[in-house]
Amino acid sequence: MGYRTAALTTLIAACLAAAPATADPGPPNRPPDAVPPRTALSVRTPLGLDWGTPNQYETRSALSTAKLYIVDYALRHGDDSAGDLELAERMIRYSDDAAASALSAKYPAAIDAVAAEYALAQTRSGPGDWSTAVTSTADLATFLAVKQSTDPTSPILEWMATAAPTAADGTAQNWGTARLPGVVGTKWGWSDLPPWEVASVSFGPGFSVAAHTRGTPEEQTADVLGAFPEMVREALRMLIAVPR
């Protein structure tokens, strides 16, 4: 069995390891694997094989997923200080906004630099602080796929895998892509003011997945789990297509 086949087999095994929790099936006329346009969804593998909703390249608010880009820059291009490491861990495990403001002030070009390095076409900083940055689910999933293949010992992945049950502001961190079978670690994002916007990006053995929803955490969970059968079908299709 070749490396590509083995990696895809690992992905499918992770997906099938457990059935997803029961999700809201949506309106009666909506197929269970259809994703409403309120949600953009992307799946990537380190091998470059991917799947996503038609709006996966849509530029949307990065919310706290922007912290992934800031931390990645600080870890690889910063001054290796203990202070940076502490702020970075707080940003990923607890989604600490104060820590993000401090680290992004120290490295104001971080988001744009990482976007250029990873060829993230929809990712850029916004006016003001880090909270106005934009990205896409395609960019987020690609970023994590690259981290898994080129930097598998990154503290980012470790901190995502040990994320706190509750964020610094008291928000529960237990929804969205984190609810998919096989997920090892997750970073979440949410809007502090209405209207609701939420994001989550996760990784597991051989895959990464990102979602952004113009809605609530519960709505994102329902949309992501509703798309699960299509994700599995696409993984199987890719496995069949890979040369032995």
Image: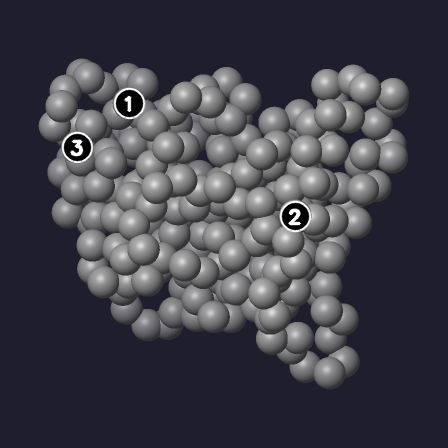
Q: Amino acid at mark 2?
A: Ala
Q: Earlier in the sequence, mark 3 or mark 1?
A: 1
- Residue 224: which numbered mark, if any? none
Q: Compare residues 131 and 149 and report the one nearer the observer.
A: 149
Q: Amino acid at mark 3?
A: Glu
For discs 3 and 2, the disc positioned in front in the rendered view: 2
- The Cα atoms of the two marked residues, 3 and 2, are separated by 34 Å
Residue 99 on image: x %, y %: 17, 42
Q: Amino acid at mark 1?
A: Leu
Asked whether residue 2 appears in the rendered view, the answer is: yes
- Residue 17: which numbered mark, if any? 2
Residue 98 on image: x %, y %: 15, 47
| Residue 190 against residue 82 in the figure, above or below | below
Could you say which quadrant of the image residue 197 lies in? bottom left
| Residue 187 against residue 151 in the figure, above or below | below
What crowding class fits label 1: few (fewer than 14 Cα within 10 Å), some (14-19), or many (20 or more)? some
Residue 47 on image: x %, y %: 66, 25
Q: Earlier in the sequence, mark 3 or mark 2?
A: 2
- Residue 86: which numbered mark, if any? 3
Left or right placement of residue 32 versus residue 184 in this view: right
Q: Are marks 3 and 1 in contact (CB under 8 Å)?
A: no
Q: Compare residues 106 and 51 and report the one nearer the observer.
A: 51
At x 38% / y 40%, what residue is drawn? Answer: 160
Q: Secondary structure at mark 3?
A: helix
Q: Secondary structure at mark 2?
A: loop
Q: Which residue is mark 1?
A: 75
Q: Are marks 3 and 2 in contact (CB under 8 Å)?
A: no
Q: Secondary structure at mark 1?
A: helix
- The Cα atoms of the two marked residues, 1 and 2, are separated by 33 Å
